[in-house]
Amino acid sequence: MPHPKKKTTKAARNQRRSHHALKKVTLIKCEKCGKPVKPHHACASCGYYKKKEVINVLKKLPRKKRVKIEKKKKKIEEKESKREKIDKS
Ligand SMILES: [Zn+2]
């Protein structure tokens, strides 16, 4: 069995471990949905990066959840179209 030739002193051990601390992760707000995102990464919740849809987030969800979200979106769109009609008249 291989063995170290000499005991590592506390000082040497602590000097080695002085670089082991974790750094704080920097986060920015997503331009579309406002959720925290790593800079230069696509948003995981809406799939947008640089104002373009890069990931189809709905496709990766299970069917039940996808249908629910699509229904919600439709309702919101209908409400907006009704408002537009009222505004025009
Ligand atoms: Zn987003």
Image (cartoon, rainbow, N blue to C red):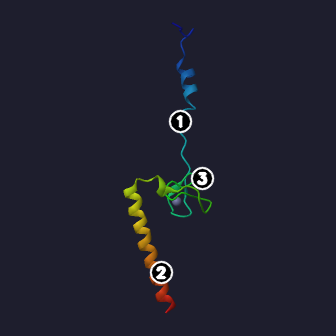
Residue 28 point in image, percent of width and height: 56, 56
Label 2: few (<14), some (14–19) or many (≥20) C-alpha neighbours in 10 Å: few
Label 3: few (<14), some (14–19) or many (≥20) C-alpha neighbours in 10 Å: some
| Residue matched to label 3 | 39
- In the image, residue 35 above or below residue 74: above
Quick one: label 3 or label 2, which is nearer the N terminus?
A: 3
Residue type at tag 2: Ser
From the viewer's perspective, is the residue at label 1 or at label 3 nearer?
A: 3
- CA–CA distance between discs 2 and 1? 53 Å
Residue type at tag 3: Pro
| Residue matched to label 1 | 21
Residue type at tag 1: Ala
Residue 16 point in image, percent of width and height: 57, 26
Quick one: label 2 or label 1, which is nearer the N terminus?
A: 1
Q: Nearer the viewer, residue 82 or 36?
A: 82
Residue 89 point in image, percent of width and height: 49, 93
User: Residue 63 vs residue 3: left or right?
Assistant: left
